[in-house]
Image (cartoon, rainbow, N blue to C red):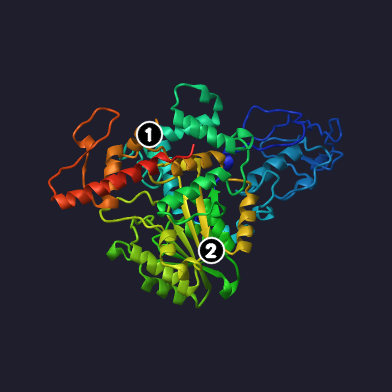
Amino acid sequence: MSKDLPVFHKGTEKPAFPGRLRCSWPGRGPPRVPPGSVPLCSGQRRRTQGASGSGSAGRCGCSEPKQAGGGVGGPSQSPPSCPGLKGAGPSPPCPCGSSCLACLGARALRWQARQPGMAENGAAPQDKVLTLDSMNPHVRKVEYAVRGPIVARATQLQKELKQGARKPFTEVIAANIGDAQAMGQKPITFLRQVSALCLYPDLLNSPEFPEDAKQKARRLLAACGGQSVGAYSASPGIELIRQDVAAFIQRRDEGIPSNPENIYLSTGASNAIVTILKLLVAGEGRSRTGVMIPIPQYPLYSATLADLNAVQINYYLDEENCWALNTEELRRALVQAREHCQPRVLCVINPGNPTGQVQSRKCIEEVIHFAWEEHLFLMADEVYQDNVYAEGSKFHSFKKVLFEMGPKYSRSVELASFHSISKGFMGECGFRGGYMEVINMDPAVQQQLTKLVSVRLCPPVTGQILLDAMVNQPQPGDPSYQQFSQAQGQAPDMFFCLKLLEETGICVVPGSGFGQKEGTFHFRMTILPPQEKLEILLQKLSQFHAKFTQEYSQRQL
């Protein structure tokens, strides 16, 4: 972390002189007093005549030196002095009220001598309660490269370009953060329709909004306190939305149950990750909690561990093997770390950030076995689960694999997994919505988790609304379905054909590839396979169509 501090230039600052001024001067120099006269001392309320000595004193004790020839002031005049104003530090007020020229001159000198960083009252930096030395030392160690000095400099360059500065480029291209809408991606219409209806329910009477968006908004508003998104929600999140998240997880994991009581909605996935780490970090010295994180990693992890004074244990992804994760490297890092801390947590980012790799099912099984064997709490950051593009790659949730490995693992390995509306096709970073699901957490500890999230009252309700739209999307037959599916880059008939292929192995061609009447959907197949295979094909197709229709017509309104 840079220790550079803002620099304030004294030349841009104007001195503040308390008290009343009895004279003024047009020039830039110190106040000039006419020869043979003495300034009015506010402590005396009268002029004093300098009869003898180097000057005359007012009632306050201020000395007002005379120039040669008996007058006061002049070009060779020495700075006036006041017994109460010596030195550059704070001093008691002068009895004259600080309005005589002696006081003013001394104050001007003290202001000019004030060091950078000193307060208006002359206090030195070390007199402040909060300084770099007295602040939380763990915060000083926090670094967050995604919004670090490079980003700050980029912002400054952008301002300079707007002001007409000449640079070897005409714009700053932001490629530093995964914010789709900041890069110009349009938000999905259905999501914004639902959020608009929830924010301004009077729009529910407008014919401009599709009926399914209105139904979803009414359902969500009914679950809000006072039927308003402006009310606090329950601290773990709106119960209805937690139920929808659990249903989404169960569909994603092909029927593996999900309990809404284990779902905690959050201010983006980041907040949930920090919350879990707060529960896990403890100890001092060699008993301090060690947290294993991948390198490269998302800087949230290293920043949070520094803030919590935990020990960061680096394990390195295999760049030569497409950033793969292997258990040999995990074991190396673990053994070395046990010499100076107590490793308790293993963090995995899948799909990877920033590497983009997707872990194979075999790799996930090995990681789960490693966590079980070494008695580690497993954290699965899965916010990029919808961003899988490479041919042959498929996302497998850690929870699904955990339960499919059998009771030996599914009943003992403690897991927290995370998802967010900021990534994937949603790209709604600014709404700050996300969730975590905890598995096999000790009930007493889970009560503490609920207490911890309660301190923050609740995650943003608007973010919860958008999260529900992500996990409870428009289905075939809904008025918004066609537009929503196309916004995801997939026409409904393409979606049908891909599902058919994935689940049955039957390869057909979507009708959109040939052209079709708007609002209708088809697929093309041939009858060239042998009769015995054709009979099997038609039977599978019939069963799939019935299952598909039932699955995507069952929607919660």
Q: Where is residue 321? Give x, y as percent.
A: 28, 65
Q: Look at 53% across and 47% down and name the residue there.
A: 243
Q: Nearer the viewer, residue 360 or 455?
A: 360
Name above or below for residue 390 compared with residue 493. Answer: below
Name above or below for residue 409 compared with residue 385. Answer: below
Q: Nearer the viewer, residue 389 or 54?
A: 389
Q: Where is residue 197? Give x, y as percent.
A: 51, 29
Residue, disc 1? 477
Q: Where is residue 202? Give x, y as percent.
A: 55, 24
Q: Nearer the viewer, residue 175 or 301?
A: 301
Residue 131 visible at all: no
Q: Secondary structure at mark 1?
A: loop
Give me the disc on residue 2.
none
Q: Look at 41% across and 43% down and name the residue there.
A: 179
Would residue 491 be found to the left or right of residue 156 on screen?
Answer: left
Residue 125 visible at all: yes
Q: Where is residue 521? Give x, y as percent.
A: 27, 34
Q: Quadrant of residue 52?
A: top right
Mark 1 touches mark 2? (CB < 8 Å): no
Q: Look at 15% across and 43% down and name the residue there.
A: 526
Residue, disc 2? 440
Q: CA distance from mark 1 to mark 2?
A: 38 Å
Give the class, few, some or many, for how many residues have Cα within 10 Å of label 2's Cα (few <14, many ≥20): some
Would residue 524 be found to the left or right of residue 435 on screen?
Answer: left
Would residue 553 be found to the left or right of residue 132 on screen?
Answer: left
Q: Marks 1 and 2: which is nearer the front?
A: 1
Name above or below for residue 358 compared with residue 94. Answer: below
Q: Quadrant of residue 109?
A: top right
Identified by mark 1, the residue type is Gly
